[in-house]
Amino acid sequence: MPKNRKATAAATEKTEAPRVVVDFDLLRTYAAQNFRDLGGHPAANSRRVRAGMVYRSSHLAEVPPESPISRLKLRTLVTLQSRAEVKHLGAPEPASRRGVRWEHIPMGDEWFNDQGYTEIANQPGRGHLALVMHFRSDWRRFFKLLAERDVYPLLFHCSAGRDRTGVGAAMLLSMLGVDRNRIVADFLESNLVYTKLPLTAGQLEPVFELIDENGGIEGFMREVIGLEPGELALIREDLLED
């Protein structure tokens, strides 16, 4: 190969988005795992996040009878999986329950395909920030949903319940005034389930930096996510207690 063609090929390799192969068969075994209540955390101004209002989980194509999810009296289920993931793993079981409102926010449609490939365009170490920036309109829809009345108890999930769900939980807990050390601890709790590919505290640092660059969580939610101050107030009213 001529030298200039070699250089072109090398440049292409450097600029191509990294490709990750998603093992749907493996993910299927994690149904209804990585589940927890986001309530109970101390928040600012001597308040606390209400328990029994917002839950997070991995995918819910199957829910074993012994799982606490099978006993939840949900009003709203929010699925953050792409359409390809739902197609391969299955629709969430709670969506078929009487009285449950299912909202599918297909986050990642442009990344996932039927072969289980995902093209992730991001700088190394900033993948979770990419989840915020690439899907701002999806997050806006998610948080506007949280600002509606009568949507709780609510459960939100992606496939593994650790990356998109983890970023969503971090933004929500930040909005509710939870200390960052506690937010990181909740993020890293996913490592109890996914031991072979553990998350690190540093993966949330770029997200926190972006929040700080926007003057704090109020400016971040307004300028980056596109939420109105009144909507933030409604979420806090529903999810915080003295």
Image (spheres, grey):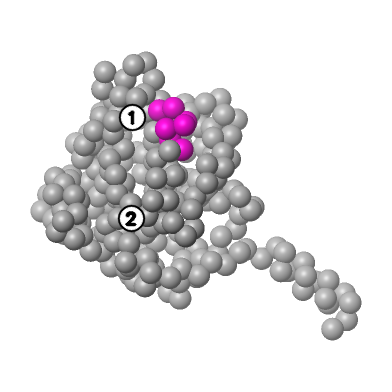
Q: Badge 1: few (under 14), some or many (20 or more) residues near its Cα, within 10 Å?
A: many
Q: What secondary structure do most residues of the magenta stretch adopt?
A: helix
Mark 2 sits on what residue?
58
User: Residue 230: within the magenta?
Assistant: no
Q: Nearer the viewer, residue 43 or 139?
A: 43
Which residue lies at the image location 37% right of the left edge and 59% below the top edge? 159
Left or right, 204 with respect to 150, comes to right
Which residue lies at the image location 26% right of the left edge and 18% below the top edge? 242
Left or right, 19 with respect to 159, comes to right
Left or right, 115 with respect to 214, comes to left
Magenta residues, start to end: 178-184
* Badge 2 amino acid: Ser
Residue extending farthest to the bottom is 1
Q: Position of residue 167 (x, y in %)?
A: 45, 44
Mark 1 sits on what residue?
41
Q: Position of residue 24 (x, y in %)?
A: 39, 70
Element carrying mark 1 = loop
Which residue lies at the image location 38% right of the left edge and 69% below the top edge? 26
Q: Nearer the viewer, residue 226 or 189?
A: 189
User: Residue 179: within the magenta?
Assistant: yes
Is the residue 119 above or below the residue 144 in the image? below
Which residue lies at the image location 16% right of the left edge and 47% below the top edge? 72
Q: In this rendering, does residue 111 appear at all?
A: yes
Image-quadrant location for residue 174: top left
Residue extending farthest to the top is 45
